[in-house]
Amino acid sequence: MTTVWKGLVVWVCIIFVEVLHGIARTLILAPVIGDFRARQVAVFTGSFLVVLVATLVAQAGQYPRSGVGRVRVARADADV
């Protein structure tokens, strides 16, 4: 997967999570603590969610799902 596609996947995931975050803020948090305070809290929770999504997507792309196509290279000085 190219860097552009990985970036696009992260971007779409962040959009989806932030939309759900905004809905939850409006329906759950704003009636309890007020709209202004809910927006202040949402800045921090939203930032956390963005970092979380980016980290999870980056980690998911590091490891191949199967061994097919992988090449194992042994060093000359390594015990095989």
Image (tube, rainbow, N blue to C red):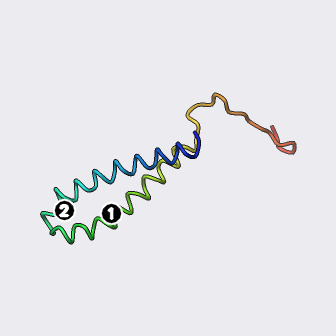
SS at circle 2: helix
Up-down relation of residue 19 to residue 38 (above or below): above
Dot placed on the residue nearer the N-terminal end, 1 or 2: 2
Residue 30 - label: none
Q: Where is residue 33 in the image (x, y as percent from the top left)?
A: 16, 69
Q: Which of 31 and 63 is in front in this view?
A: 31
Tags 1 and 2 touching, CB below 8 Å: no
Q: Position of residue 54 (x, y in %)?
A: 47, 53
Seen at 52% across and 42% down, the residue is 5
Amino acid at the residue labelled 1: Thr
Q: Where is residue 42 in the image (x, y as percent from the top left)?
A: 28, 64
Q: Residues within 10 Å of mark 1 (few under 14, many from 20)?
A: some
Q: In which quarter of the image is the C terminus?
A: top right
Q: Distance between the residues labelled 1 and 2?
A: 12 Å
Which residue is most to the top?
68
Q: In which quarter of the image is the N terminus?
A: top right
Place residue 63 in its image quadrant.
top right
Q: Where is residue 21 in the image (x, y as percent from the top left)?
A: 28, 55
Q: Mark 1 points at which residue?
A: 45
Left or right of residue 28: residue 68: right
Q: Which of 46 and 15 is in front in this view?
A: 15
Left or right of residue 19: residue 30: left
Left or right of residue 44: residue 69: right
Seen at 32% across and 67% down, the residue is 43
Q: How crowded is mark 2: few (under 14 residues within 10 Å), some or many (20 or more)?
A: some
Q: Mark 2 points at which residue?
A: 29
Seen at 17% across and 58% down, the residue is 28
